[in-house]
């Protein structure tokens, strides 16, 4: 299937792998002013001296910049992937060459090796965890509860992870504090919208070498990610159809000018499908049967459960890889449906995928870095915590400064006015 190394990896020998990974990391850092500013502060203040950080994230260049920034703050860091197909092996090897970092991430591993690598990270007995999808928090609670007392807290990168954590917290099962990094303005309004929008579409385009112009693209889910995909697809002259389960979001999509349909009807209309719901079974057998020959199916949600691939396999008479990262399923009728990146998040798991653009990851990882710093200095109760607003603002201010953008300050009178309730007509 798509287990081949990304075409951008050069891993023929350890030395050139490290060099190729180092080159990617250096390029990313060059475009990450927030990470550079925080690194400078961290190198001086050493806020993470003595901490051990365990990370499960997409191991590519921007994540490596975050990892090295945490190491520069004095931490020992162990890292592995949060998806079997998103690791760049050269970046993983370059990271592993760092004195204070151990990387267990490898692309194309099976489930057993994926979870063994998470175990290996937990073997470093982290005092702080950084997750994308909550697999590390889950493994610690399930298999290593004895470590929980010495864990200061965790940070969670993505919508699905925060959703899982809140469910765990509601059940009274979350035993250490975790920051919902995903839910901050500096993350969600940029990474989820622009990051997912741009990287999902560019990964689909590069994987297939096909155009969006003149096509009908069906976007399942009109949350932050769906909004980004819909907007960017419209910007590439596609006709956009949105499917939703929430009446307000459906209306929002309608007022934005998109066609809103149930999936059963959208199935017959779409040329390209992109799922962004975070839920399972969004596209199933009843939908596959209505689709046209040649339809492209891609997922941009965190887990590979949105497109029912078992259901599709059951319908298929045969299946074959037609391009790297494209699996064709031929139904008994002769109709062919093309699944990208095994239904895993296409913007990171396709062989050509690079993840989100560097600038948005600078913001997301800026929030991660200040949250890790916060956990090392302040004790929080177990449970999911919103990121303190002043931390998010701090990251925004660094970025504004780097962009050379000025904003206004409130006068004392304005501040007083906004805090008062007795000024009527
Ligand atoms: N994401 N990471 C990258 N490192 O290139 N690209 C996207 C990268 C994150 C993003 O923040 C999102 O919340 C998460 O991947 C989904 O797993």
Image (cartoon, grey):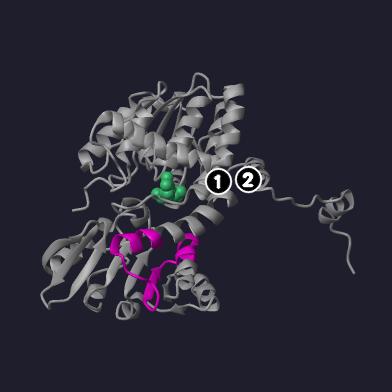
Q: Decide if residue 316 is on the left or right side of residue 101.
A: left
Q: Residue 322 versus residue 241: which sits nearer the camera?
A: 322
Provide the secondary structure element on which disc 2 rests. Answer: helix
Quadrant (top left/top right/bottom left/bottom right) for the C terminus: bottom right
Asked whether the beta carbons under mark 1 and mark 2 sit within 8 Å of each other, the answer is: yes
Residue 398: say if magenta.
no
Q: CA distance from mark 1 to mark 2?
A: 8 Å
Q: Decide if residue 275 is on the left or right side of residue 39.
A: left
Q: Mark 1 Cα within 10 Å, few/some/many (few <14, many 20+)? A: many
Position of residue 72 measured from the top left corner of the image (x, y, whole percent): 51, 25
Q: Quadrant of residue 265?
A: bottom left
Q: Quadrant of residue 64?
A: top left
Q: Which residue is the extreme one toward the top?
A: 50
Q: Earlier in the sequence, mark 1 or mark 2?
A: 1
Residue where numbered disc 2 is placed: 399
Position of residue 405 measured from the top left corner of the image (x, y, whole percent): 70, 50
Magenta-tinted stretch? 201-229
């Amino acid at each position: 299937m798509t287990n081949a190394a990304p075409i951008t990896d050069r891993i023929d020998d350890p030395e050139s792998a490290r060099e190729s990974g180092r080159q990617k990391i250096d390029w990313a850092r060059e475009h990450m002013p927030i990470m550079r500013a925080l690194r400078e502060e961290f190198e001086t203040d050493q806020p993470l001296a003595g901490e051990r950080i365990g990370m499960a994230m997409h191991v590519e260049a921007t994540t490596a910049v975050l990892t090295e920034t945490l190491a520069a703050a004095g931490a020992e860091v162990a890292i592995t992937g949060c998806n079997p197909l998103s690791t760049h092996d050269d970046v993983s090897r370059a990271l592993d060459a760092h004195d204070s970092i151990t990387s267990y991430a490898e692309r194309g591993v099976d489930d057993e090796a994926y979870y063994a690598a998470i175990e290996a990270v937990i073997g470093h007995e982290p005092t702080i965890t950084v997750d994308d999808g909550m697999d590390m928090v889950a493994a610690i609670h399930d298999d290593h509860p004895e470590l929980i007392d010495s864990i200061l807290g965790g940070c969670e990168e993505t919508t699905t992870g925060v959703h899982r954590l809140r469910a765990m917290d509601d059940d009274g099962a979350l035993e250490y504090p975790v920051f919902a990094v995903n839910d901050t303005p500096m993350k969600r309004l940029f990474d989820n919208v622009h990051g997912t929008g741009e990287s999902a579409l560019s990964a689909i385009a590069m994987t297939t070498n096909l155009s969006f112009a003149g096509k009908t693209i069906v976007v399942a889910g009109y949350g932050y990610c769906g909004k980004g995909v819909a907007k960017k697809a419209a910007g590439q002259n596609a006709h956009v159809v949105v499917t939703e389960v929430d009446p307000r979001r459906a209306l929002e999509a309608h007022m934005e000018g998109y066609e809103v349909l149930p999936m059963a009807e959208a199935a017959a209309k779409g040329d390209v499908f992109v799922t962004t719901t975070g839920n399972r079974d969004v596209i199933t057998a009843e939908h596959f049967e209505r689709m046209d020959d040649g339809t492209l199916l891609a997922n941009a949600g965190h887990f590979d459960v949105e497109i029912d691939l078992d259901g599709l396999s059951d319908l298929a008479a045969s299946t074959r890889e037609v391009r790297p990262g494209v699996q064709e399923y031929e139904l008994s009728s002769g109709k062919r449906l093309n699944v990208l990146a095994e239904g895993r998040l296409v913007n990171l798991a396709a062989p050509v995928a690079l993840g989100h653009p560097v600038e948005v990851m600078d913001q997301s990882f800026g929030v991660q870095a200040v949250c890790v710093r916060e956990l090392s200095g302040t004790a929080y109760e177990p449970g999911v915590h919103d990121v303190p607003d002043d931390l998010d603002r701090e990251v925004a201010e660094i970025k504004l400064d780097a962009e050379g953008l000025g904003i206004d300050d409130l006068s004392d009178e304005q501040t007083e006015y906004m805090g008062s309730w007795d000024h009527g007509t």
